[in-house]
Image: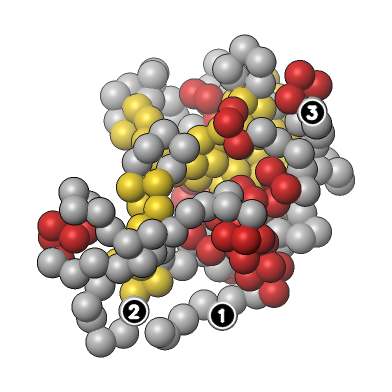
Amino acid sequence: MLVRTPLQPDECRWFLAAVDQHIVLFEGCPADCFRLAKWKVSGPDHFVTPSGKPRHLFSKPGETAAWLNREYIPHIAAYAYAVLAGGFDPRRSSFSLYRKFSRDLITKRAGGSFETDAEFYDIDGGVFLQIEAKASERETAALAAAIERHGALSELPTTAAKEVEYVLDLAPKYLWVVGPGSLDPPRHMYRVRTVGPLNVAFDPVEEFPSPPTWNAP
């Protein structure tokens, strides 16, 4: 397997914890797997999201070199960290969830599809913690630097704003931008404040947020 973006110790540690603690369960592709139907090859990397949707750690099975879906390593690792170290309840969460925008935003339009990496919910079903996972240290640092330099969604460069514009629709209380090398200890955590109909402020926070009190261990 060729990994063009080297794996970092923190993401590896929490990815393995996700497997060891059964946060994610890998199995062979079932008979109705869409990847099996497309490529006619099964693999042991099939897993299911909390909403019952199939996902795979690798794509293009049967190729000479394995095609790792690189972002899934910090993605799964960050989700596991929130559950195992942060105390968040996986029963009140989503992972790799497809949504549609409910209204027109800055560049996005109502009805357009988008995917969120992970969400943890409060007692009212609102998004308490949103995880935005990146596949590389470079991508993570670039987005975090833009957020910290400008502080508000409306001030971000367009490329950065597009990556987190969904916060206008979902209104999370916290946003965690995470990637290889910035997962443990957690960096790039922000409290999200609405400051207008099409704008939010990102306030950096030093500590990993505690889960809602009803959800605490």
Name the residue rendered at 49%, 23% in the picture: 169
The amino acid pointed to by label 3 is Ala
Q: Which quadrant is the C terminus positioned in?
A: top right
Question: Is 208 situated above or below 47?
Answer: above
- Viewer-side label of 2, 3: 3
- Viewer-side label of 2, 1: 2
Question: Is 150 situated above or below 212?
Answer: below
Q: Is residue 210 left or right of residue 193?
A: right
Determine whether label 3 and label 1 are within 8 Å by CB. no
The amino acid pointed to by label 2 is Ala
Location of residue 196 by image quarter: top right
Horizontal and vertical percent for residue 197?
55, 16
- Viewer-side label of 3, 1: 3
Inter-mark Cα distance, 3 to 1: 35 Å
Front residue of 173 and 78: 78
Q: Earlier in the sequence, mark 3 or mark 1?
A: 1
